[in-house]
Image (cartoon, grey):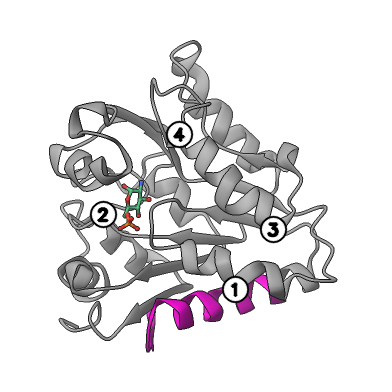
Amino acid sequence: MAEVVIVPDAAAGGAVVADEIVRLIRANPATVLGLATGSTPLPVYEALPPRLVGVDVSQVRGFALDEYVGLDVSHPESYRSVIHREVVEPLGLDPSRVNVPNGAALGIQHAGDDYEAAILAAGGIDLQILGIGTDGHIGFNEPGSSFASLTRVKTLTQQTRIDNARFFDAVDEVPMHCITQGLGTILRAGHLVLLAFGERKADAVAGAVEGPVTASLPGSAIQLHPHATVVVDEAAASRL
Ligand code: GLP
């Protein structure tokens, strides 16, 4: 059973998770962080810079959860761009130590295996930050994803494309495909920290934390992990 931490608001949730990340980096400067995109983890990334003053982050490594396929990496909404803008620059991380799955069409057939190999070579992810989609997806593992899945190319559901259209000019501009860490990849991380804020996420949170462990709600995979923490506000916790 995941540990559930109910916080007054997203900023407080960001602070709780940022404190844990700083504790990890102080204990092990070569900490490997699993980085999520979307709006949910932003309060974590915003809370980190003031807490990292005087902390050596030069050896910290990062692995993003996912990336769009076929979106040029220079596009402002490619997850490579987003991770650079929201995480690498403000936290002062070494860009060469922060990895994002390669969503370029060239070499896409090897990209998943290459990413898994890079995670293994880094010694695995110590703390994986997760958001959750309204349909219960984590990373881009949509309903039906295998709990044993590793990093691979997937097709986005129309619901996720609609949800993510706010980052683009129109839903048609949201890519059709993505490359995402699998549920199996995510379950190998040392500590899972899933954040969710707002009533919109209440059903997905209830399913992930208390529902049956089922591929129909990929977030329920966290129940299989021995060290999972769910950080939610009252609204997201309202159906627990
Ligand atoms: C995207 C990301 C997920 C994220 C989800 C929720 O689909 N690939 O990693 O958890 O959106 O997004 P938000 O946090 O903006 O609600």
Closer-to-camera residue (172/6):
172
Q: Residues within 10 Å of mark 3 (few under 14, many from 20)?
A: many
Give the label on residue 78, or none: 4
The residue at which mark 3 appears reads as 91
Give the mark nearest the N terminus, 4 or 2.
Answer: 4
Residue type (three-letter) at the residue carrying disc 4: Ser
First in residue order: circle 3 vs circle 2: 3
- Asked if marks 3 and 2 touch (Cβ < 8 Å), the reply is no
Read off the residue under disc 1.
Answer: 18
Residue 62 or residue 42, whichever sits in front: 42
Callout 2 secondary element: helix
Residue 62 position in % (x across, y down):
64, 49
Task: Quote the CA–CA distance across marks 3 and 2.
Answer: 30 Å
Amino acid beneath label 2: Pro
Q: What's the residue at 26%, 45% (across, down)?
A: 166
Judging by the rendered image, the residue that carries numbered circle 2 is 218
Label 1 to label 4: alpha-carbon separation: 24 Å
**Image quarter in which the C terminus is found:** bottom left
Q: Which region is colored magenta?
A: 2-23
Type of the residue with mark 3: Leu
Please state if 166 lies on the left or on the right of 121 as rendered: left
Which of label 4 and label 2 is nearer to you?
4
